[in-house]
Image: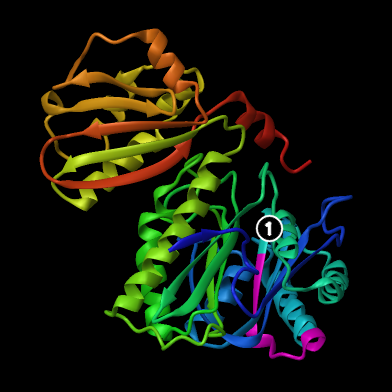
Amino acid sequence: MEIISGGVTAAKGFEAASAAAGIKYQNRSDMALVYSEKACKAAGTFTTNVVKAAPVLWDKKIVDSNTKVHAVIVNSGIANACTGEEGFEYCRETAHTAAETFGINADGVIIGSTGVIGMQLPIEKVKTGIKMLADAKNASEENGHLAAKAIMTTDTKPKEVAASFHINGVKVTIGGMAKGSGMIHPNMCTMLSFITTDANISRNALKAALSKDVKNTYNMISVDGDTSTNDTCVVLANGAAGNEKIIEGTKAYKKFVKALNYINETLAKMMAGDGEGATALLTVNVVGAKSKKQAKVIAKSVVCSDLTKTAIAGHDANWGRILCAMGYAGEIFDPSKVDLKFESKAGVIQIMKDGVAVNYSEEKATEILSQEEVIVIADIHVGEKKATAWGCDLTHGYIDINADYRS
C-alpha cells in the first residue's frame, strides 16, 4: 500500500466541488459535492442515537435498498435534525434538485448535514448551492481539498487522506474526507465521513469491509461523550480501476480491507485530535488483555475519562486517574499486575509497575505529556489481546466553543 496525497478525488472517476451558499456561515464555503458519473455501489453506517437527523434517514434508506449512488451533497452549519416531516421533505427537494442538475436519479443522491440541531434548512439557498457545485466540479486534488474544508463546522482543519494498492498489476485507489470536532463518542459520533474508491468490488464485500472496520476506528474515538444525531460514514465504489472484482475471503479483499482501515483510522485520529478546544491527541493502548472486548472496553473508559483528559491538558502525570478509569470500565483484571507508561515524540517513561508507582522524573513526564500526541500504554498481563482508543485533552476551549455554539 502506498500513501498518496489527496482525498475524495484521488480515485479515478470522482469529482468534487465546494460552494458558499450562505446557509449559516458568511464569507466561507458551506456546501460540498462528491460526484461520480459512473454509478457507485454504496455501503454505509450511521448513528446509533434513537434521534436520527433527516439526512440519516434518507441515506439509510438508499444504502439499505442497494441503490446505485452518483452524488453526495453536504451542507455545514445546520444539521437538519429534529426538523420533522419538513426536514425530510428538504432532503427530498435537495435530491431532486441534484437529480435534475446532474441528470441522475434522485434515489442515487446521498445527503449529509452538520451543524445546529432544530433549525430548518434555507432550502432555496441549498438549491442555489447545488447549481454552484455543478458549475465548479472537477477531478482536481484542490477541489477535493476545498470540499473537505466546506463540511467543517467547529473543526480547525480539513481532514482528508488517500492511499493506493495493486491487484494483479492494476492500481486501485481509495480516498476520503471527514469532519468532526465535537459531539464525538464511540458508536459513531458527530462525524461525516465520505470515502471514494475506484475498486471493482462486490457489494457484499464492500459492506462487510466497512461494517467490520468502523468497530476498530470511528467507534474507538471520543471527544466529549455525546453521540450525535447525524453520524454518517458512506463508502462509494465506482469500479473505474478495472481490476478483477474483489470478493470476500481473497487476497485482494485483504488488501482492500487494509487500505480501508488506513483511511478510516487516519480520519478517526484526525477527528479525535481536532476535538473542540483540544491541544493534544490522546491515544490509549491497552495490551495484555484476555480478549479484544476487554481491551476495547478498558481503552474506551480511559479515553472517555474527563479527569484523565484534564490531566493531559495540564501535562500532569496523574496516573491514578487512569487506573481509576480502568477500574470502573466493567472488566475484571488484577490491579497489582498493571504496568503503565506514557509515550510521545519526547520519549517513553514508565510510571507504574505491578500496580505501584515507580520512581520517575516528573519533569520528564511533563515534557512527554506536553506533545501534540500523548500515548498511554496499559499492560494488564492477563492475555495477548490488545486494542486502541483515541481522544483528546479537555481544556477551557471546549466550554468556550459550546457555551454559545448556536450564536
Above or below 14: residue 275: above
Q: Nearer the viewer, residue 342 or 327?
A: 342
Q: Is residue 168 left or right of residue 82?
A: left
Farthest residue to the front: give it: 169
Residue drawn at x 68%, y 41% as measured from the top left: 156
Q: Quadrant of the C terminus?
A: top right
Q: Is residue 403 left or right of residue 255?
A: right
Visual colour scheme: rainbow
Question: Crowding near pointer 1: few (<14 within 10 Å), some, many (20+)?
Answer: many
**Secondary structure of the residue carrying numbered label 1:** helix
Does residue 349 belong to the magenta stretch?
no
Quadrant in the rendering for residue 382? top left
In this picture, which residue range is highlighted in magenta?
A: 100-112
Q: What residue does disc 1 label? A: 148
Q: Residue 316: tell me if it is visible.
A: no
Residue type beneath disc 1: Ala
Residue 51 placement (x, y as % from top left): 54, 61
Residue drawn at x 43%, y 74% as measured from the top left: 166
Q: Nearer the viewer, residue 115 or 364?
A: 364
Q: Quadrant of the N terminus?
A: bottom left
Residue 87 placement (x, y as % from top left): 71, 69
Does residue 111 belong to the magenta stretch?
yes
Residue drawn at x 44%, y 83% as measured from the top left: 201
Residue drawn at x 44%, y 54% as measured from the top left: 265
